Image (cartoon, grey):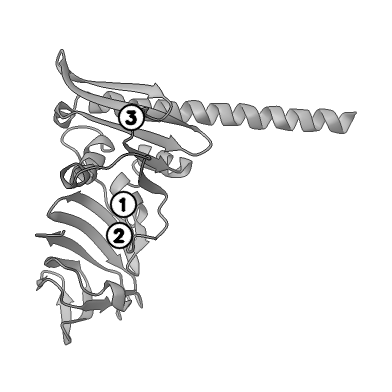
Amino acid sequence: MKSSKIVLTMIAFIVALQCANAQKVADIIKSYVEDYRQDRYASEAMQFGIEVPKHGAWTVNVTGKKVGTNWEVLLKEGLPKTPTFVYKIEYPTLVGIHKGKINALTAQGKAFAGDYTPMSIYQMKGYKPTMVEYAKINPFSFHFWTRGYPEIIPFGESTTRRAHGSNFTVFYYEKGLRTAWYRVLPKERVRDNPREQAAPFPMLIVAIKGTTKGIVGGKNVSLEKGQTIFIPPNVAHKWWNDTKEPTEAILIMFGKGA
């Protein structure tokens, strides 16, 4: 009898905890909706879903209508009835974004299409976006999931994820532009996999700390703080840090295909 009471108490505690977490998730999402009502980018209509596994799902409808000094952004429980795209976010990642420990684009960043990410975007059955509509999702993700104005993105060792062999923080993505910050620890190798050594668009690597060695188009290079290297489209390149201190660089990818 005593053990049964203990089990029931534990079940009640778990249920209460799940309910509390579900409410916390709803409050976090609501806070982003309220913030986006003040965002100039809310002038463009957009409907999408948010799914947090085991915690619920919501529909956000950015109508593009002005309401007073703000914009109309509606929130309701459940996934959209009309097929669209959905953010699927793990609970700890949502909390991390909420607390400024990681930004949404970094949470989605990966080296290859099949890589795991704690935040991803999937298309509902029947949703077939045009190339123009698809290209709007990354900049929209930045603006919706970044609070305040002007929008400030923290970056540093504690705000990163790993891809291409080192830690990174994404700054901003839109069609024709991708920007990120990389931190390469001693003995780490970046883009060592031949599959990721060449990109179909040009890029600039701006060294801001330390010295990183590499091979670009078959030539050995040494990139030091205060230097920038231009890498043309489809040119293979890889990097490594053989010093005793972390090196840092800002990556700017641009042009057709970026």
Placement of 33 over or under 172, stated as above or below: above
Image position, residue 199 (x, y; %): 19, 69
- Name the residue: 54% across, 27% down: 20
Give the number of the disc on residue 117: none
- Name the residue: 19% across, 28% down: 45
Mark 3 vs mark 2: in front: 3
Image position, residue 156 (x, y; %): 29, 55
Evaluate if marks 2 and 1 touch, with contact meaning CB atoms under 8 Å apart. yes
Badge 3 density bin: few <14, some 14–19, many ≥20, Cα 10 Å: few
Image position, residue 141 (x, y; %): 26, 41
Badge 1 density bin: few <14, some 14–19, many ≥20, Cα 10 Å: many
Mark 3 or 2, nearer chain start: 3
Is residue 184 something that shows in the picture?
yes
Evaluate if marks 3 and 2 touch, with contact meaning CB atoms under 8 Å apart. no
Mark 1 vs mark 3: in front: 3
Mark 1 or 3, nearer chain start: 3
Left or right of residue 25, residue 134 in this image: left
Is residue 191 something that shows in the picture?
no
- Residue extending furthest toward the top: 68
Residue occupied by mark 1: 106
Residue occupied by mark 2: 168
**How far apart, in angstroms, are the residues tagged by discs 3 and 2?**
35 Å
* Rendered-image quadrant of the N terminus: top right
Q: Residue type at mark 2?
A: Phe
Q: Secondary structure at mark 3?
A: loop
Q: Secondary structure at mark 2?
A: strand
Q: Residue type at mark 1?
A: Thr
Left or right of residue 250, residue 75 in this image: right
Q: Secondary structure at mark 1?
A: helix
Q: Quadrant of residue 239?
A: bottom left
* Rendered-image quadrant of the C terminus: bottom left
